[in-house]
Image (spheres, grey):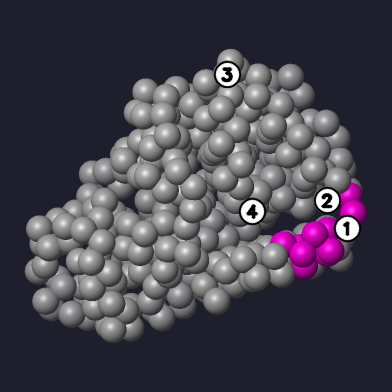
Amino acid sequence: MTTANTSAVLSSVLEAGGPELSRCLMRTETRLREVAESHGDELARHAAGTLAAGGKRLRPMLVFLCAGESASDALVSAAAAAELLHMATLVHDDVLDRASVRRGRPTVFADGGRAAATATGDLLFSRAFAELVADGGPDAVAALSRASSSLARGELMQRADAWAEDVSRDRYLERCELKTARLFEAACRLGSLLGAPGPGCADALGRFGTRIGLAFQIFDDVLDVSGPTERTGKPRGADLLDGTVTLPLIIARERDPGLASLDVRAVVTGAPQADALCDRIARTGALGDAREQALHFVAEAKAALHDLPLSERQQRALHLVADGVVERYA
């Protein structure tokens, strides 16, 4: 997603959400900074660096948008918890992938080494749950715990599938749900549990979160093939280089017999080879098909909001969030 697209989407969501949404996100940012700076100089430096790498704070935004008109301290803690869990997974992913760059900045792994990155991720995980214990209640803690367990299962699936030639679309989608969509779902559920969106909203808002999470991951995988480093913040074809089998590759293998039998691990030994394989995948039309699958999930996400007792402002803002997932491709 380009900087211009990111700014436009965020501006639209913030405008639709009203001034209270901006205030809540600012309070969350303050809380994240306090957490990052409170655990000794070395860990504070790495945690603060991870925080400074930014991101769109989409998960905290979902917490507040699914909470109705509430803006309690418990919601701020829940929003911070969702983002801390997300940050922790990114730091640990970079350790597993030996990644040097994320969002255009050196990773904790590159800056401090494996031990520092592992400890930083562990710290962020623990602080995510600490944020919920005081004000969230057992249901909120359980929602985040389920997401955390799913993240671990999804990561194990991804590692088991590394370089595999027979990953199905269904298995890929299951992995995406575990590794990405369940945290989106948890963010929506946390907002519903701790806010006041109206009766019977938690399950439907959870479905909304799951569907936009699936779309988000598919578009991320499309961007890995289609987007240059200056646009995505990571090398083109990074997934190919670390053996992650994504939907564009799965579809391309269905269309190109040569790709179906290609040993990616043997062929993709560096950035030039990854770039060439990305071009070959794109020529099959796989990116368009993957994009259509993601758009299907966006439509399902919007449908999950039908007939819910949400305000017009909430409906509009949540629809804009769903559309923003699509804008990442533009």
Q: Which mark is residue 41?
A: 3
- Quadrant into which the C terminus falls: bottom right
Q: Secondary structure at mark 1?
A: loop
- Quadrant into which the N terminus falls: bottom right
Q: Nearer the viewer, mark 3 or mark 4?
A: 3
For disc 1, the marked residue is: 18
Q: Secondary structure at mark 3?
A: helix
Mark nearer the N terminus (2 vs 3): 2
Q: Nearer the viewer, mark 2 or mark 3?
A: 3
Give the alpha-carbon distance from disc 1 to disc 4, as whole Å. Answer: 17 Å
Count of number-bearing discs: 4
Mark nearer the N terminus (2 vs 4): 2
- Callout 4, which amino acid? Lys
For disc 4, the marked residue is: 56
Q: Judge by depth and name the residue closer to the eye, 298 or 2.
A: 2
Q: Where is residue 54 shown, x and y percent of the image?
A: 61, 47
Q: Where is residue 6 shown, x and y percent of the image?
A: 64, 65
Disc 1, disc 2: CB below 8 Å?
Answer: yes
Q: Nearer the viewer, mark 1 or mark 2?
A: 2
On screen, residue 306 above or below 233: below
Q: Residues within 10 Å of mark 4 (few under 14, many from 20)?
A: few
Instruction: Work out whether residue 53 can be spotted.
Output: yes
- Callout 3, which amino acid? Asp
User: Would you identify the image quadrant in which residue 71 lies?
Assistant: top right
Give the alpha-carbon distance from disc 1 to disc 2, as whole Å. Answer: 7 Å
- What span is colored magenta in the figure? 9-20
User: Would you identify the image quadrant in which residue 19 lies?
Assistant: bottom right
For disc 2, the marked residue is: 22
Q: Secondary structure at mark 4?
A: loop
- Callout 2, which amino acid? Ser
